[in-house]
Amino acid sequence: MFITWLDVNSWLIELADRRILLDPWLVDTLVFNNLPWLIKGVRPQPEEIPANVDLILLSQGLEDHAHPPTLERLNRALPVVASPKGAKVAEGLDFVEVTALAHGEEFVLDGAVSIKAFPGAPIGPFLRENGYLIRDLSSSLSLYYEPHGYPDDSLRQVGSVDVVITPIVSLELPLAGPIIRGQQGAIELAEMLNPQILLPTAAAAKVEYEGILPPLIQSKGGADELRQALRDRALSAQLLRPAPGERLELALQPRVAVA
């Protein structure tokens, strides 16, 4: 398994000789609901769009996961698997093959990779977006991804997963509570899924944020605190922090395939 972090929540996952582009925001600015004065994400320079992508995978319909300017740069013939909200974004951009996955539903790519949707982050009072369990069907390799740190209890029935991608830093707004659950969500996932490797997502490396909202956001936790918390609980997960753009081969030990 190879993993490339493309900053914030964007990843390239190489598994079973397939290349999956996950939650891509690679070009232009990031604006929510056409309100740049509220918050705007700025890339110092565009990220190179990966070549030979086999699938686009979107966990949410929000702009930092289903980023219209980035999706507009991608081949509309590429298959898209997404949460129902993310699927609407892709359909609105005229992607030809779009599969919306409700919680519990599964998609199989070329008979080689299984993608199963689990309840993920709550977005407002009535919507939970997607987390994904991604498996190589020819081996025991598996990965779970959810970008806001909200593991669902249904994951307890999955068994061990090799790699977990989750936030490790919490972001909170005064009075509003957490936007992203970092350390606590990561610990819960480590206890549920017993991963060999934890990879942090959501935090920015090169990206910068402008507007009235970013100065109000409080961050808590980090790599050192999480490593100590894992040791305190006798959890064996190894926390890795790849540099943006670094293609990382994950050294994984063979295990029994998840159910």
Image: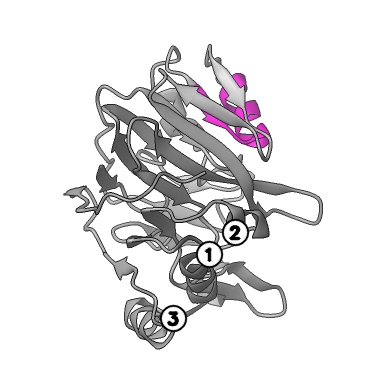
Res 192 label = 1
Q: Is residue 144 above or below residue 190?
A: above
Circle 2: residue type: Arg
Whether the residues at callouts 1 and 3 have beta carbons within 8 Å, the answer is no
How far, Cα to Cα, is label 1 from label 3?
Answer: 20 Å
Q: Which marked residue is nearer to the observer: mark 1 or mark 3? A: 1
The magenta region covers 80-92
Q: Which marked residue is nearer to the observer: mark 3 or mark 2? A: 2
Label 2 Cα crowd, 10 Å radius (few <14 / some 14-19 / many 20+): few
Q: Nearer the viewer, residue 69 or 120?
A: 120
Q: Nearer the viewer, residue 112 or 246?
A: 112
Whether the residues at callouts 1 and 2 have beta carbons within 8 Å, the answer is yes
Nearer-N-terminus badge (1/3): 1
Q: Is residue 178 above or below residue 73?
A: below
Q: Is residue 141 above or below residue 223?
A: above
Q: Is residue 138 magenta?
A: no
Secondary structure that dominates the magenta span: helix
Residue at 39% from the left image edge and 31% from the top image edge:
137
Residue 244 can be seen in this image: yes
Circle 3: residue type: Gly
In x, y percent, where is residue 124?
75, 55
Which residue is denoted by mark 3 in the rendering? 221
Q: How many marks?
A: 3
SS at circle 1: helix
Nearer-N-terminus badge (3/2): 2
Res 235 label = none
Residue at 59% from the left image edge and 48% from the top image edge:
32
In x, y percent, where is residue 76?
45, 15
SS at circle 3: loop
Residue at 45% from the left image edge and 72% from the top image edge:
169
Res 156 label = 2
Residue at 51% from the left image edge and 32% from the top image edge:
68
